[in-house]
């Protein structure tokens, strides 16, 4: 008896299994979910622990730690290869340093495989993706090649043959990355560039010195005046003397300073030719880099401080008095000696707006917050205002403002002292110091101000004074976006004027009436804008109706013309003879239709005036003399 899959027993077993699976899925939730509420059957969560962010400080420090091992290999491998006495004399030291650098290389691979990267602006922290990306990159193969155990070739070539470790130089891109990061972070980039250039030149001269010593050994020490002297001479036998002499000889070649002996062998000629070509590049690099550094320093000074040379040339060409020129020179000298920057906005122009705002807030917001009228304003308004502050430096005895002048800006004292003096310029009423401010009422343009926005005192600088100024135009532009803050500032200004007795109540009321008139005018302007919008919409609708009507008239004309052609076509199809003058009659009928086309357009476009009850078909029938043969087929 067959009990296969189609039998009742097997069907009963499958039903029992499905019931058990359903019970397992819906019954015991505790067995399906882990302690954290996740389903263990789902994909395991991505591991994000210990991921290195390339922008964080740890990565920068690690790059600095990788500089010594790479530089060590660049310097020591060629040194030990070309100077066997140095290689054998300090063998224990070299082996210790070799394997210490290898450990740093291995640790660098661990850091590299855990270094995150940005994808659509988000740092990737998934270790699986990081490993896959690193293992598939060319950097992994280069790093792996730099750690191959080539030291085993010591058994073949000898312990002094350090060239077997030449693959360690493949980690040079790490050194370049570290130097680039250090250049962007240092506060003295020009000095760092010069230092980096000197390190490159030192390594180049070092390699050339080692190769020169090896070539001298190949040709023969002391065989001519170009090679290294005979090492049997005690003066030239010491290892230190050998290295220093070769380094000095290479430095002479690369700097093209001093006379080098004329080579005698072909190998020496080829070596000198190569060195002289490299020397040209080295000299050009030095001159170019030093020139760039000098240019950058000059550009920095021109950005930080006004160009004194142009001003002096202008003063000389216009024969300005010696006293005034001396005052200007003293002002420039004060800026340079005290490193006072006058062009903050130009310097920070390359930064995004939010970064410029943060810098300005951190530098100027405490000073601006000291102003009474701005103390209770919202922070966003103050952040807008700090971007408008400009720095000004006044010399000793120079007037900041005079009594009766129209006020166009307010001033905040950053550093220095100012005196409030009488008209004679001698009597001092008060002394203003750091953190004081003046002129804030004149930039608000308050109605009823008895002074009429004019200065009420003479302010003179006692010594060199650094001030921040805020112009009326800048404040007006900012307050146009903050109407509530504008009303608040004007109210505080009125309170200050009232305490000073400088507010005219009638003028303030007139100012309030003028403000009401301005409000009404604004409302009328908005109503006028709405009416203009409606008129434009009606004109557009009328134009659209006109186009539709023209289309209907054209359609009627085509139908009328078709009705005129149909009788002739039917007659021609039936073979009836045409009467004489039929073509001439049809032509006359078309001329009459075209003549009456204008009247039809006027009637249809005007909506068919009263009394004109005939249809287009009736008018056509009347024009044709009422002959039904011309209207029906």
Image: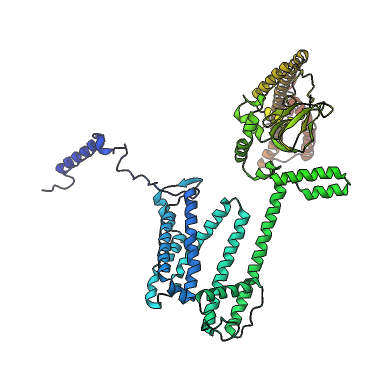
Q: Is residue 372 above or below residue 56?
A: above
Q: Is residue 322 above or below residue 605?
A: below
Q: Quadrant of the C terminus?
A: top right
What residue is at 83 percent from the left and 45 percent from the top? 325
The reply to whether residue 543 is visible in this rendering is: no
| Frontmost residue, 131 versus 426 | 426
| Frontmost residue, 510 versus 131 | 510
What residue is at 45 percent from the left and 66 percent from the top? 168
| Frontmost residue, 357 versus 8 | 357
Quarter where residue 624 is shown:
top right
What residue is at 43 percent from the left and 73 percent from the top? 89
How far across and how far down the image is residue 12, in percent? 16, 40
**Figure disc tally:** 0
| Residue furthest front in the image | 234
Quarter where residue 391 is shown:
top right
| Frontmost residue, 448 versus 113 | 448
How far across and how far down the image is residue 288, in percent? 67, 62
Q: Is residue 514 above or below residue 626?
A: above
How far across and how far down the image is residue 449, in percent? 77, 19
How far across and how far down the image is residue 417, in percent? 72, 33
| Residue furthest right in the image | 319
What residue is at 60 percent from the left and 29 percent from the top? 379
Q: Is residue 619 above or below residue 466?
A: above
């Amino acid at each position: 008896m067959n009990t296969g899959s189609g039998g009742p027993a097997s069907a009963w077993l499958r039903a029992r299994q499905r019931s058990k699976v359903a019970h397992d899925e819906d019954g015991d939730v505790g067995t399906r979910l882990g302690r954290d509420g996740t389903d263990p059957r789902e994909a395991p969560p991505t591991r994000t622990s210990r991921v290195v962010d390339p922008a964080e400080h740890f990565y920068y420090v690690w790059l600095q730690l990788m500089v010594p091992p790479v530089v060590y290999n660049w310097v020591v491998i060629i040194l030990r290869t070309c100077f066997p006495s140095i290689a054998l004399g300090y063998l224990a030291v070299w082996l210790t340093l070799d394997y210490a650098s290898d450990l740093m290389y291995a640790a660098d691979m661990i850091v590299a495989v855990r270094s995150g990267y940005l994808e659509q602006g988000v740092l990737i922290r998934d270790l699986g993706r990081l490993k896959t990306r690193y293992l598939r990159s060319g950097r992994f193969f280069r790093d792996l090649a730099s750690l191959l155990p080539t030291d085993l070739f010591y058994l073949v070539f000898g312990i002094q043959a350090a060239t077997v470790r030449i693959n360690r130089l493949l980690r040079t891109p790490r050194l370049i990355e570290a130097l680039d990061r250090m250049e962007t972070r240092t506060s003295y980039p020009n000095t760092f560039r010069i230092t980096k250039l000197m390190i490159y030149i030192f390594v180049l001269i070092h390699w050339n010195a080692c190769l020169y010593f090896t070539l001298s050994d190949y040709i023969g020490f002391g065989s001519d005046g170009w090679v290294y002297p005979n090492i049997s001479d005690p003066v030239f036998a010491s290892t230190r003397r050998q290295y220093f002499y070769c380094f000095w000889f290479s430095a002479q070649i690369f700097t093209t300073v001093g006379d080098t002996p004329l080579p005698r062998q072909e190998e020496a000629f080829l070596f000198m030719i190569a060195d002289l070509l490299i020397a040209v590049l080295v000299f050009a690099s030095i001159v170019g880099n030093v020139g760039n550094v000098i240019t950058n320093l000059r550009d920095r000074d021109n950005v930080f401080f006004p160009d004194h040379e142009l001003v002096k040339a202008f003063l000389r060409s216009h024969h300005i008095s010696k006293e005034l020129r001396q005052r200007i020179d003293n002002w420039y000298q004060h800026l340079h000696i005290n490193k006072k920057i006058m062009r903050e906005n130009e310097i920070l122009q390359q930064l995004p707006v939010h970064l410029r705002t943060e810098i300005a807030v951190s530098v100027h917001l405490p000073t601006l917050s000291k102003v009474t009228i701005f103390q209770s304003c919202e922070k966003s308004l103050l952040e807008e205002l700090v971007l408008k502050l400009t720095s000004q430096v006044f010399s000793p005895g120079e007037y900041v403002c005079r009594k009766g002048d129209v006020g166009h800006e307010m001033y905040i004292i950053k550093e220095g002292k100012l005196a409030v003096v009488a008209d004679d310029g001698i009597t001092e009423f008060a002394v203003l110091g750091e953190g004081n401010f003046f002129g804030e009422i004149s930039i608000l343009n308050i109605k009823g101000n008895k002074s009429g926005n004019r200065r009420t005192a003479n302010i003179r600088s006692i010594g060199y004074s650094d001030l921040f100024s805020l112009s009326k135009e800048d404040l007006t532009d900012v307050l146009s976006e903050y109407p509530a803050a504008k009303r608040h500032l004007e109210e505080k200004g009125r309170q200050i004027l009232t305490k000073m007795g400088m507010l005219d109540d009638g003028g303030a009321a007139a100012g309030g009436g003028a403000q009401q008139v301005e409000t009404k005018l604004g409302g009328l302007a908005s109503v006028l804008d709405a009416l203009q919008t409606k008129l434009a919409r009606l004109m557009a609708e009328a134009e659209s109706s006109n186009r539709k009507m023209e289309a209907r008239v054209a359609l009627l004309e085509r139908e009328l013309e078709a009705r005129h052609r149909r009788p002739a076509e039917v007659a021609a199809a039936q073979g009836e003879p045409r009467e004489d003058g039929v073509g001439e009659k049809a032509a006359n009928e078309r001329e009459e239709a075209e003549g009456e086309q204008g009247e039809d357009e006027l009637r249809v476009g005007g909506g068919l005036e009263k009394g004109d009850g005939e249809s287009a078909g009736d008018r056509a029938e009347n024009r044709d003399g009422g002959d039904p043969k011309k209207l029906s087929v």
